Image: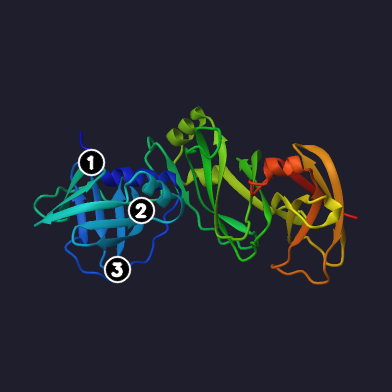
Amino acid sequence: MKCNIFKTILFILIISILFIPLIGCNIFSPIIGKWQDNQEQEIVEFTSGGNVIIESKGYIVTGSYELIGDDIVKLTFDNLAGDFISAFGMDTFKYTISGDTMILQSGGTTSTYYRHGSTNTTAINTSTSTSTTKNSSYKTTTVISTNINTPFTVRTLGISLSFGEIDSKYAIVVRLQSTNLATTYTNYDVTLYENGNYRDYSSFSTDNEIGFKTVYFPVTEEEAEYYNTNFQQLDLINIFTIEVKAKTEYFFTKNIFINTTEDPVFNGYCIYVDLKPTLFTTPNTEYIVELYENGLYRDSSYFSTKSSISSDSFYYIYFACSEEEYQLYHLQYDLRNIFNIQISQK
């Protein structure tokens, strides 16, 4: 039985929450134009500007393409979906064009497309809308928020497979886009509300970059089936709402690791805690740092911030450890799964 290539790509893209087109270069090739798959009721367009547009069953998915040699085309889709497509080996195809017929081959599968409007094509419904059919397996709604008074706004929201990102097989997948209020090295709380009532909580860290973040909230298989059967696509954003706030923490724990030291106080070995200031760090202030190991209190230290704090500021806090701990942990660059800290003003 025929395995349609673009149908597979469309499925991966929809459940990966995107719809961000990329800019391509101007090219000329017989592949340029609209191509139709009669069996799958699908139209794929390669533009002269290097973009690819897939229209199928009410969805439009966009990306870019690059011609490699005379018979290879490589597709590119942004963010999370692009990773999935590459993992499935569905981003590079060999194509053969003869008259109004194009054959695409990838991963042992072959699909046949006809130039749109030729005598080989049949009339199909190419209308697109913001809603899906009632029986659609997965739904995603694109919501570009105009509210810039929050560090992150909801770009897309949908219910899909979790792809192992959380323990639950199915998830509410929220794609967040940063605003000009987002900052690096900051922890953020994400609260999910269902019909105005609290449902779940998650968090993420921006580390040294901001941009897009994907947050997963678990749902049961029954819930996923219920929402995808009984609600249209745009209904989801009215049912589920998201609130993102910066955590009121004085410092962001960038890293915790064990290494050697020449400081005689620590007998040659110590635990290093790498701290970055947050929005709530104040200059000329003394802070107490408590170190916990597997949830149990272990040690404490203190330090003072400088008179001026910038995005490049950082602070190393040191705690004593044994040679045995060094031998056990020194090859691990990040020990935040074992050690954690709590910081308060002195």
Residue, x 83% and y 39% (percent of image)?
A: 297
| Image coordinates for residue 59, horizontal then vertical, percent | 35, 49
Q: Amino acid at mark 2?
A: Val
89 vs 248, nearest the viewer = 89
Question: In the image, is residue 182 above or below residue 300?
Answer: below
Image quarter (top left, top right, bottom left or bottom right) of the C terminus: bottom right
Q: Residues within 10 Å of mark 1 (few under 14, many from 20)?
A: few
Secondary structure beneath disc 3?
Answer: loop
Q: Amino acid at mark 3?
A: Gly
Q: Compare marks 3 and 1 and give the one earlier in the sequence.
A: 3
Residue, x 42% and y 56% (percent of image)?
A: 78
Left or right: 203 as drawn, with respect to 91: right
Q: Nearer the viewer, mark 3 or mark 1?
A: 1
Judging by the rendered image, the residue that carries numbered circle 3 is 49
**Colour treatment of the image:** rainbow
Residue, x 20% and y 54% (percent of image)?
A: 35
Secondary structure beneath disc 1?
Answer: loop
| Image coordinates for residue 235, horizontal then vertical, percent | 49, 43
Question: In the image, is residue 26 above or below residue 238?
Answer: below
Judging by the rendered image, the residue that carries numbered circle 2 is 61
Q: What is the number of the mark on residue 108?
A: 1
